[in-house]
Image (cartoon, rainbow, N blue to C red):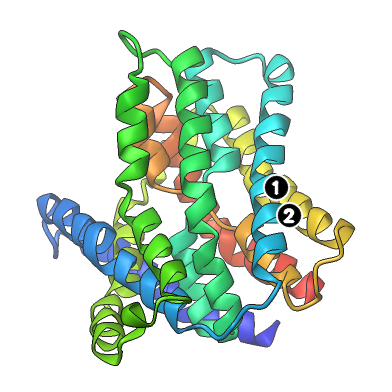
Amino acid sequence: MGDIVQGLVPIAAAIFIGWGARKTGLIPAELWGGVNKLAYLVLLPALLFVTIASAGSLGGEAAPFLVIATGAFVAMAVIALLLKPVLHTDGPSFTSVFQGGLRWNGFVVLALGQQAFSADQAALLALVFAPTVPLINVLCVAVLSVWGAHEGRVSPSRVAFRIATNPLILGCGLGALASFTPLLREPLLLDTAELVGRGALPLILLTVGASLDFSAISAKPAMLAAATALKLLVAPAVFIGLGMAFGLPADIIPVLAAVGAAPGAASSYVLAKELGGDAELTAGHVTVTTVLAFLSFPLWIGAVS
């Protein structure tokens, strides 16, 4: 657990610095969008590519790990849907609870992987993006199309295009392709991707901090509590439980725990605004889970390490 706590300290500091830079106006609000776009479109795909391409052979571990991780996200979607009748809330608020239980901030987990996990474990964390980004987007858009307060019909072709051109999926795909394509493992290419990717995690952590909105915490406290419990209590238990039930190696279970215990993703706020979810509730959830994740990470990962 010591390595996990030690790895979390600089991550928390970077997030706090980002929050302080926005709160004090040191970095004008209008600049954060450009910083986030640079990290998302350029730096993070490079980091995912080089992390996966440079990893040693993962043997037979990658496939069962990815199947179980993907299955755990599906299980969380089912659990959230089953909770709808007992939540007694409106449709837009339910979509935010659903997104809160499902979407994960993989960037914080990647940063933790770089700090506290082995190279192979960090590569597994990067690989999770490939199957789960499209799955989570499809599930969340489907729920928002049914219960969101949007006007008009959600376009399936637009959703499919967004998924197919997602830069994180492309970075993961090229990294996986590089494992059996020597041309993509040329030192010049890997060195360039590594140099570009180095800036990804510091910048994205700063933008995570800048996106925190503590004023949104008071919005619908009961629904916020439900969404937070789904993300930080139920999800880690589901991920760890499935990993153990299907006999994954002991050194892989902490990776599952990290994915399950991750905070909510800021992208859920964007989707809530676009498709009629409860954006304020979503903003509160992202803020609360980001802060509490620094307790959930060491507790859950430590419990299975």
Image position, residue 153 (x, y; %): 34, 11
Image position, residue 67 (x, y; %): 68, 53
The residue depicted at 67 percent of the width and 86 percent of the height is: 2
Task: Write down the residue under mark 1.
Answer: 72
In this picture, is 188 found above or below 114?
Answer: below
Task: Write down the residue under mark 2.
Answer: 239
Q: CA distance from mark 2 to mark 1?
A: 6 Å
Name the foreground residue: 109 vs 129.
Answer: 129
Q: Residues within 10 Å of mark 1 (few under 14, many from 20)?
A: many
State yes or no: discs 2 and 1 in contact (Cβ < 8 Å). Answer: yes
Quarter containing the C terminus: bottom right
Name the foreground residue: 9 vs 192.
Answer: 192
The residue depicted at 60 percent of the width and 15 percent of the height is: 89
Image position, residue 37 (x, y; %): 20, 55
Quarter containing the N terminus: bottom right
Left or right: 98 as drawn, with respect to 68: left
Count of numbered tags: 2
Q: Give the quarter of the image for residue 221.
A: top right
The residue depicted at 37 percent of the width and 51 percent of the height is: 212
Name the foreground residue: 23 vs 290.
Answer: 290
Q: In the orientation shown, which residue stands out farthest toward the top?
A: 152
The residue depicted at 45 percent of the width and 48 percent of the height is: 265
Name the residue type under label 2. Phe
Name the residue type under label 1. Ala
Image position, residue 52 (x, y; %): 46, 74
Left or right: 66 as drawn, with respect to 132: right
| Observer able to see residue 5 | no
